[in-house]
Image (cartoon, rainbow, N blue to C red):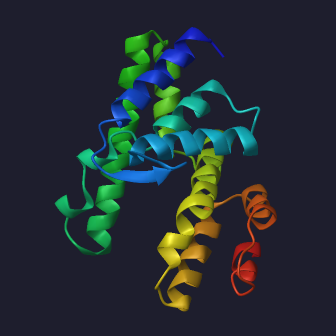
Amino acid sequence: MTGDLFTRVIEAIDQANTADPETVEDGGETRPAALVYGQRMSAELIRFAPQASEPLRVAVRGQHIERWKMPRASYPEGRQGYLEWRRDLGRYHAQRVAEIMAAVGYPQADCERTAQIVRKEGIKRDPDVQTLEDVACLVFMRWYFAGFAEGRDRDHVRHIVGRTARKMSAAGRADALEQFDLPSDLVPVLAD
């Protein structure tokens, strides 16, 4: 890693995410949700893929930078509106991370590579992009799945786990099975 540049870009991403109006409880403190999410993503990446490239490390930290600025409610209801929102979010996050990288002095090629990872271009083909997706799925399962599943129909939960599993690599699915004590009816869905 380029040391000082990496430290500065992470600090800048975190600073941007401190403005998130949504908060979560984290270690007994109330903290901005986007800041906590980015830090959880980085911690999971270090655990799952400690050899990760610097562009991937930056992409992981900034994947949801300033997410609150594009609320889901600002797009039409339904699947089409959801997909449009997700696409636009990916572009926005990639642009913001690349801007921050450029501002702290990263070469243009590094900014472009990181933006490509954040946009998830080449998922299933590009190892860095796939690792970002695996880490996002692992973070969801570790930190957000229980709250998501609470009160939902079991078939719907199984469907979501299946969709999550399809986005993951074999290594990511194996890691999830090793890391999490999943209900027995969900294990086959993740193992497929």
Q: Quadrant of the C terminus?
A: bottom right
Q: Locate the N terminus and report the quarter of the image it occupies.
A: top right
Q: Nearer the viewer, residue 125 or 4?
A: 4
User: In this picture, is 7 found above or below 59?
Assistant: above
Q: Residue at 54% x, 17% y: name it.
A: 7
Q: Is residue 139 above or below residue 184?
A: above
Between 84 and 184, the one lying in front of the other is 184
Q: Residue at x 64, y 68 (%)?
A: 165
| Drawn side of residue 132 relative to residue 29, left or right | right
Q: Position of residue 24 (x, y in %)?
A: 42, 53
Judged left or right of residue 3, residue 86 is left
Count the numbered circles shown: 0
Q: Is residue 55 above or below residue 183?
A: above
Left or right of residue 159: residue 12: left
Quarter of the figure with residue 14:
top left
Task: Name the residue located 58 percent from the left edge and 28 percent from the top edge.
Answer: 55
